[in-house]
């Protein structure tokens, strides 16, 4: 998949690597993993209003796309009462408090269901595990994200702990944390 302007080119290949089809899709393909674009992360309140802007040009977890996703949808952050987002039965409301929570690669190559190679804007390759149970994330109109996964941390530059996607007994299991798309 290559990102071109406001569209993504998808090249489908057979299991033997023979090109089968080329499609251009509207929008962008993104990754919950790697580094966010730019050096500013915004925080929004429970009503979706911009609250703060943070400079993340230094060494900070907020530069990691997966960290921001994890804080938005999985973690139970301990904040002072006047800074807490409204909770409903222990689950944050469907508000993306930390944005962006994805990276925009130049190209993604998915060679099988368990791994992908992501190329950043300088065409530098980073390999990700993809133990994500086939989940996709739609952060906003025109974007569909794949998940990078790791096996040792909640969220880091490599992605999100694979147990979030694969272990139904884990209290962080994603089905119990994020709002589902409505059918229709």
Image (tube, grey):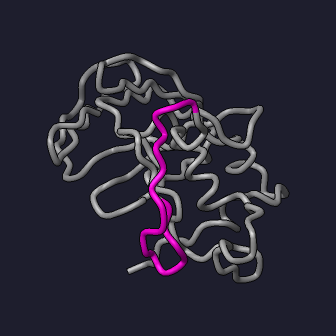
Q: Is residue 61 left or right of residue 13?
A: right
Position above or below: 104 against 81: above
Asked where in the image residue 78 lies, by quadrant, the reply is: bottom right
| Residue in the foreground of this view, choosing between 112 and 85 | 85
What percent of the width, then of the height, locates residue 46? Answer: 54, 77
At 54% from the left and 74% from the top, the residue drawn is 94
Quarter of the image containing the C terminus?
bottom left
What percent of the width, then of the height, locates residue 5? Answer: 14, 42
| Residue in the foreground of this view, choosing between 177 and 168 | 177
At 77% from the left and 32% from the top, the residue drawn is 152
Q: Is residue 21 left or right of residue 1?
A: left
| Residue in the foreground of this view, choosing between 11 and 127 | 127
Asked where in the image residue 129 lies, by quadrant, the reply is: top right
Q: Is residue 179 left or right of residue 86?
A: left
| Residue in the foreground of this view, choosing between 14 and 139 | 139
At 19% from the left and 52% from the top, the residue drawn is 26
Q: Spot the residue most to the right.
A: 169
Is residue 3 within the magenta segment? no
Is residue 53 within the magenta segment? yes
What percent of the width, then of the height, locates residue 180? Answer: 54, 71
At 42% from the left and 59% from the top, the residue drawn is 138
Position above or below: 33 against 6: above
Q: Is residue 84 left or right of residue 113?
A: right
Q: How many marks?
A: 0
Quarter of the image containing the N terminus?
top left
Region rendered in magenta: 43-59
Asked where in the image residue 49 lies, by quadrant, the reply is: bottom left
Position above or below: 66 against 172: above
What percent of the width, then of the height, locates residue 172? Answer: 76, 57
């Amino acid at each position: 998949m290559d990102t071109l302007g406001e569209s993504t080119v998808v090249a489908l290949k057979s299991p033997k690597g023979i090109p089968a089809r080329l499609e251009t899709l509207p929008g962008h393909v993104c990754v919950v993993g790697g580094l966010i674009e730019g050096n500013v992360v915004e925080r929004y309140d429970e009503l979706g209003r911009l609250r703060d802007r943070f400079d993340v040009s230094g060494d900070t977890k907020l530069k990691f796309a997966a960290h921001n996703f994890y804080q938005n949808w999985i973690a139970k952050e301990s904040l002072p009462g006047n800074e807490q987002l409204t909770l409903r039965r222990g689950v944050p409301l469907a508000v993306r408090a930390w944005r962006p929570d994805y990276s925009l690669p130049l190209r993604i190559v998915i060679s099988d269901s368990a791994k992908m190679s992501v190329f950043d804007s300088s065409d530098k390759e980073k390999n990700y595990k993809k133990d994500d149970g086939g989940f996709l994330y739609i952060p906003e109109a025109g974007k569909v994200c794949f998940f990078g996964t790791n096996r040792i941390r909640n969220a880091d530059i490599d992605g999100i702990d694979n147990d979030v996607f694969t272990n139904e007994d884990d209290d962080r299991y994603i089905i119990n944390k994020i709002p589902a798309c409505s059918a229709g």
